[in-house]
Image: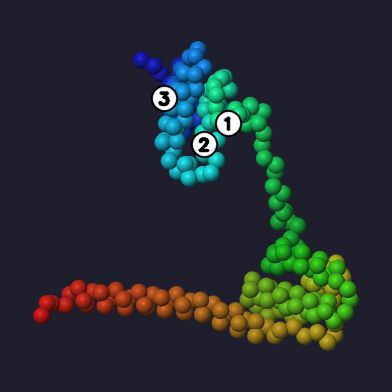
Amino acid sequence: MEYNTTRNNLVIREYGRNIQKMIEYTIAIEDREKRTQLAKYIVNLMAQMNPVSREMGDVKHKLWDHLHIIADYKLDIDAPFPPPTPQEIALRPERIPYHNPGDIMFRYYGKNIDKIIDKAIEMEDGPEKQAITRTIANHLKKSYLSWNRESVTDELIADHLNTLSRGKLKLSDEDRLSHTNDILARNKKKKFKKEGNGNHNNNLNHNYNKVRKEKKQKPFE
């Protein structure tokens, strides 16, 4: 009897012990042509064991790579793809840079607002830049009220804008932001409309099921 403790470790578990044994047997075949034919047969078996992967565009290349990996790169055959090297498999993809949450000064404004503010800073001084500044301030106020369901003063928003822009964007004395009550009313109206659509759909489904039930129970005349 053969015990797991005496067997070689499974290299890729999803293919199981039998596939690995077949590959080990293929390595020992002296005739190159026979090795290649058996390798093609094994790859077809591997594809059948994982049918979902067949929908992927590079599935064939991936299966042949797995074949060589399980064979510990010792399989000398005429493959349709160049065999991978241990160094290539060991390579790790470059680390994706993530923004540190600590870099966001005010979380309720998000990270993208920094990019918008930077673009506004680059604009030439004038009415257009001042209009953009006022629009950004209104957006800050709207975002603030979405997270903090309380009143907020325009002075606080102006202070936040000054901080985020490093003192380079400022509201003028003539600038007036949207009223807090108007913003809260619009937010409430959007929420009510969204919930209303959901209730409307539920009523339609209820009425439809009711009609179907009545038709089903209606006796033949």
Q: Amino acid at mark 3?
A: Asn
Residue 70 visible here: yes
Residue 17 visible here: no
Q: Residues within 10 Å of mark 2 (few under 14, many from 20)?
A: some
Give percent across and percent down for residue 53: 48, 41
Which secondary structure lies at badge 3?
helix
The residue that mark 2 highlights is 60
Marks 2, 3: nearer the viewer: 2
In the image, 121 versus 159, the foreground residue is 121
The residue that mark 3 highlights is 18
Image point 52% across, 28% down: which residue? 67
Marks 3, 1: nearer the viewer: 1
- The CA span between labels 2 and 1 is 9 Å
Q: Earlier in the sequence, mark 2 or mark 3?
A: 3
- The CA span between labels 2 and 3 is 20 Å
User: Which numbered disc covers residue 81?
Assistant: 1
Image point 51% across, 44% down: which residue? 56
